[in-house]
């Protein structure tokens, strides 16, 4: 769970409107370019795709942070990092699910997180093409399009629905754990990217997991999931924070989380 010890909750909650302003600014750059046949796609050094929409979105968010929080650090997927030694660091993923974006699937999103001393304390999952937004913040319930949402309490694997981005991401190291867990659930589905974690927070699914992610992929998800009553950690059960391994799992129920992490670890 998120550690609230000595955390300036009031200061963080006061930054929620700014986080939503960032999401609005990102929408203005991404949504008009979605399903545009004129959109060109480049391939980065890690073989992942990037578009002008990714870059313009992050640039717009960084400009707002420079104006409103110049003393905060920033970690972004497309434009690097600065001030990571500061107490407050914003973590930005302008388009989570660029492959979905460029192939016309609406299940991509913008991820915005604020961390305090490395711990994610505010998170936004914004899904422009679906006009859906989840906002999680320490000390208050997660909101889905402005109304509180909750995870559902499913404790048995044979009743659980599991989502992961794609089984293609699992290699020799992590496939045994993935198969041990996913082979026992009622349903396993793919290709939702960050949207799966929003669905979990709203009580539609029970487990979401991914291997080998970066902080900009998962930091925003943690406050959303935990503010809705769920659990999110790395596969070992350690906190999903700036120091995490990047192998992350979220569940709607704490008992289900204990079972999931045990199987992922191979215990």
Image (tube, rainbow, N blue to C red):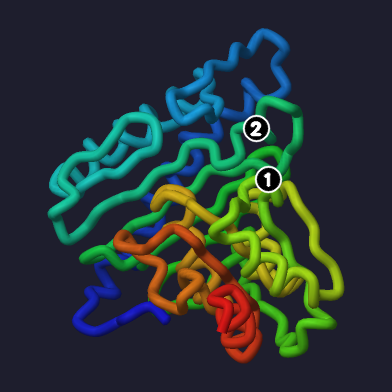
Q: Nearer the viewer, mark 2 or mark 1?
A: 1
Question: Where residue 72 sits in the image (x, y, percent)?
Answer: 19, 49
Label 2 secondary element = helix
Distance from disc 2 to disc 1, alpha carbons, whole Å, reads 13 Å
**Residue extending furthest front?**
172
Residue drawn at (24%, 84%) of the image = 5
Residue 15 placement, left or right of 253: left
How dense is the environment of label 1, judged by Cα within 10 Å: few (below 14), some, or many (20 and up)? few
The answer to whether 51 is drawn above or below residue 242 in the figure is above
Residue drawn at (28%, 73%) of the image = 10
Of callouts 2 and 1, which one flags the residue occurring earlier in the amino acid sequence?
Answer: 2
The answer to whether 92 is drawn above or below residue 14 in the figure is above
Image quarter hosting the N terminus? bottom left
Using the rendered image of the protein, determine whether residue 256 is visible from the camera's viewpoint. Answer: yes
Residue denoted by label 2: 99
Residue 31, numbered circle: none
Residue denoted by label 1: 168
Question: Where residue 127 sits in the image (x, y, percent)?
Answer: 63, 45
Residue drawn at (52%, 24%) of the image = 50
Image quarter hosting the C terminus? bottom right
63 or 256: which is nearer to us? Answer: 256
Label 1 secondary element = helix
Question: Where residue 136 sits in the image (x, y, percent)?
Answer: 48, 66
12 or 118: which is nearer to us? Answer: 118
Question: Where residue 211 sits in the image (x, y, percent)?
Answer: 54, 56
């Amino acid at each position: 769970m998120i550690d609230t010890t000595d955390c300036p909750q009031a200061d963080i909650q006061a930054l929620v409107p700014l986080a939503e302003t960032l999401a609005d600014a990102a929408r203005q750059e991404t949504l008009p370019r979605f399903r545009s046949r004129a959109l060109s796609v480049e391939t980065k050094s890690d073989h992942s795709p990037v578009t002008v929409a990714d870059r313009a979105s992050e640039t717009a968010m960084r400009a707002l942070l420079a104006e409103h929080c110049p003393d905060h650090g920033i970690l972004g997927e497309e434009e690097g990092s600065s001030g990571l030694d500061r107490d407050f660091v914003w973590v930005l993923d302008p388009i989570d699910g660029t492959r979905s974006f460029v192939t016309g699937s609406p299940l991509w999103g913008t991820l915005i997180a604020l961390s305090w001393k490395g711990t994610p304390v505010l998170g936004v999952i914004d899904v422009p093409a679906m006009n859906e937004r989840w906002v999680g913040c320490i000390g208050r319930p997660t909101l889905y399009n402005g109304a509180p949402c909750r995870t559902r309490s499913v404790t048995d694997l044979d009743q659980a629905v599991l989502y992961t981005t794609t089984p293609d991401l699992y290699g020799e190291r992590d496939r045994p754990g993935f198969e041990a867990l996913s082979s026992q659930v009622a349903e396993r589905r793919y290709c939702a990217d960050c949207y799966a974690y929003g669905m979990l927070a709203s009580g539609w699914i029970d487990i979401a997991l991914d291997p080998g992610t970066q902080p900009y992929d998962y930091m925003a998800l943690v406050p959303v999931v935990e503010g809705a009553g769920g659990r999110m950690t790395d596969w070992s059960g350690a906190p999903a924070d700036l120091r995490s391994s990047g192998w992350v799992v979220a569940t709607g129920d704490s008992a289900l989380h204990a079972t999931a992490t045990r199987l992922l670890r191979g215990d």
